């Protein structure tokens, strides 16, 4: 992270002018042609793919909010829309130029859901004619830049690995980096202004302070003060997550953060049920099934768990498969000092459970175990996935770097795999301690198994999808489940427990060692869908079970002006 910078030099200004709007592929250059020569794209994907998203209306009970809070909520949604526009620029380029080249409304909607012409839940396969393969570095790097060139030149330019910079070529063709605050200045100034207006309407002073600090961060690239402020915000009924946050879009290095936003309403009754679990984190960290050096970092105890109704998604969070739980901030220093906050998006979670998970179970889970698939278990598995991000290790044992830096483009997939498997470890431990009183261990294991089939359908381009493929193949090798002649799956409880411990240890040690080669091998060998599994997944498509959800959302849906 870097502090607010002085005005760029004349050379940097020339570089900025040369690189904006964003560098374009040949297909994008065509897409951004004048309206008189605009191409009419043809859909080249499978027709059935256009129906893989189940529409869900995002609402919540706003009756308990004051008039000022209603006005504030509208401003927060407007700020989220700015994040949406920025993410389009990071993922593709000119949104309108692309959509204007598509005449069919259904295909336009599918393109909009994917934030570009690549199917995010099918390995980023292009689905429009004339579109090249998706650049691994999205719009964060020059498309003609190689990894070798970056690594050779990177010591010689400023902010090269910053989460909040765009890598460009200067007038001499050399690589350089431009902070987001300068590259996206107009949009970020607009969003900051909206956050400051919202702060004036906030009844809760901690929330008002957070909004002002977040507005400052958008213009300075220094997000840490607002992350600390967000950790101290406990009682506000309205919640906002906004900014450049996750690095999944950067599949070249995993360095660059993408813009996104969530606008949320706190569910007080469900939040009260969850508050007790954070206290167990230090104890659970000490009990991890790895040598002591891999669990020497102690998570902060100021973490909290809460449930929310999400009323607006924007940007990265809204692209392709939808997030149903949040664990933030990602800043390692904040995590070690304060822990993290875990936000469970209960209304979106329930929509996925009802419309996707239960129908999957009817097709692929053995009838004798289907009764063990419950919403409480689905909610808990998802929640403890987020809690488990706080366990393990954030810095390599040799002290040379963070785990994220050492594992590069594989860091996100391995971290998601760690969170899933340690989430199950936590459930097992908390059931034994009597801290969890709902359901049985079989409920959690069988629901988790059905959840693997749900997430594997997100495809190889998703960090969550890769993590699920690795875990499915690892579980299969360890006999954690069986598959009968009818293609129905059944969990073996004893072997599942053994597989959980084995995979937990493997992932935690790969992270602590910063073993890039080991993770690369793991993903190459196990991060794939074998023919038998693909045949089973095809049954889900044949049964018209949606792959994920999409949203009807916004101020009009909520009755806001």
Image (tube, rainbow, N blue to C red):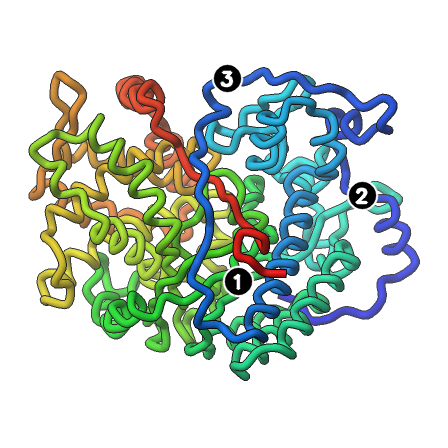
Q: Position of residue 105 (x, y in %)?
A: 62, 27
Spatial separation of the CA atoms under disc 2 and disc 3: 33 Å
Q: Tell me the distance, in whole angstroms, between the alpha carbons under discs 3 and 1.
A: 35 Å
User: In the image as oriented, which residue stretches furthest toward the bottom?
Assistant: 205
Q: Which residue is mark 1?
A: 241
Q: Is residue 96 above or below residue 292?
A: above
Residue 471: x and y in percent read 28, 38
Left or right: where 17 falls relative to 364: right
Q: Report the residue at 71% width, 35% height from top.
A: 143
Disc 3 is placed on an element classified as helix
Residue nearer the viewer, 32 or 405: 32
Counting residues from the start of the chain, the first of labels 3 and 1 encountered is 3
- The residue that disc 3 covers is 47
Do residues under tags 3 and 1 come within 8 Å of each other at their CB atoms? Answer: no
The answer to whether any part of residue 534 appears in the image is no
Counting residues from the N terminus, which is met first, the one under dot 2 or under dot 3? 2
Question: Is residue 359 shown above or below 316?
Answer: above
What element does badge 1 sit on?
A: strand
Quadrant where the image shows the C terminus: bottom right
Residue 441: numbered disc: none
């Amino acid at each position: 992270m870097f502090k607010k910078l002085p005005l760029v030099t004349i050379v940097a200004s020339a570089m900025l002018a040369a690189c904006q709007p964003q560098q374009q592929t040949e297909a994008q250059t065509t897409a951004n042609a004048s309206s008189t020569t605009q191409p009419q794209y043809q859909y080249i994907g499978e027709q059935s793919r256009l129906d893989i998203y189940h529409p869900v209306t995002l609402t919540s009970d706003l009756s308990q909010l004051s008039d000022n809070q209603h006005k504030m909520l509208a401003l927060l949604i407007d700020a989220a829309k700015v994040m949406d526009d920025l993410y389009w620029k990071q993922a593709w380029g000119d949104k309108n130029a692309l959509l204007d080249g598509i005449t069919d409304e259904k295909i336009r909607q599918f393109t909009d859901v994917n934030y570009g012409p690549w199917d995010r839940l099918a390995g980023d396969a292009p689905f429009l004619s004339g579109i090249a393969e998706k650049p691994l570095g999205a719009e964060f790097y020059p498309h003609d830049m190689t990894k070798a060139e970056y690594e050779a030149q990177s010591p010689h330019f400023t902010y090269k690995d910053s989460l909040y910079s765009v890598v460009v070529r200067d007038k001499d063709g050399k690589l350089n980096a431009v902070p987001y605050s300068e590259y996206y200045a107009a949009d970020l100034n607009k969003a900051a202004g909206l956050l400051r207006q919202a702060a004036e309407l906030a009844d809760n002073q901690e929330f008002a302070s957070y909004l002002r600090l977040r507005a400052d961060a958008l213009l300075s690239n220094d997000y840490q003060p607002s992350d600390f402020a967000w950790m101290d915000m406990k009682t506000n009924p309205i919640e906002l997550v906004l900014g450049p946050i996750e690095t999944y879009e950067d599949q070249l290095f995993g360095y660059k953060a993408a813009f996104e936003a969530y606008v949320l309403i706190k569910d007080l009754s469900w939040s009260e049920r969850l508050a007790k679990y954070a206290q167990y984190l230090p104890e659970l960290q000490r009990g991890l099934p790895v040598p002591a050096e891999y669990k020497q970092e102690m998570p902060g105890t100021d973490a909290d768990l809460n449930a929310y109704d999400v009323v607006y998604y924007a940007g990265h969070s809204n692209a392709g498969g939808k997030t149903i739980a949040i664990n933030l901030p990602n800043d390692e220093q904040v995590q070690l000092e304060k822990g993290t906050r875990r936000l469970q998006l209960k209304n979106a979670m329930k929509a996925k459970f009802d419309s996707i998970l239960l129908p999957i179970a009817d097709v692929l889970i053995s009838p004798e175990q289907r009764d063990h698939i419950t919403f409480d278990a689905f909610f808990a598995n998802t929640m403890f996935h987020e809690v488990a991000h706080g366990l393990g290790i954030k810095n390599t044992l040799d002290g040379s770097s963070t785990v994220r830096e050492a594992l590069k483009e594989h860091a996100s997939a391995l971290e998601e795999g760690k969170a899933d498997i340690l989430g199950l470890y936590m459930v097992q431990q908390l059931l034994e301690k009597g801290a969890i009183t709902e359901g049985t261990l079989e409920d959690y294991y069988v629901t988790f198994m059905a959840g693997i089939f749900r997430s594997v359908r997100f495809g190889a381009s998703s960090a969550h999808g890769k993590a699920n493929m690795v875990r499915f193949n690892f579980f299969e090798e360890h006999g954690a489940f069986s598959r009968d002649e009818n293609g129905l799956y059944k969990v073996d409880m004893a072997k599942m427990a053994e597989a959980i411990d084995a995979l937990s240890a493997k992932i935690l040690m790969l992270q602590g060692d910063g073993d890039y080669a080991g993770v690369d091998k793991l993903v190459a060998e196990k991060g794939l869908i074998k023919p038998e599994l693909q045949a089973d997944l095809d049954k889900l498509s044949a049964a018209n079970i949606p792959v994920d959800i999409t949203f009807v959302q916004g101020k009009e849906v909520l009755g806001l002006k």
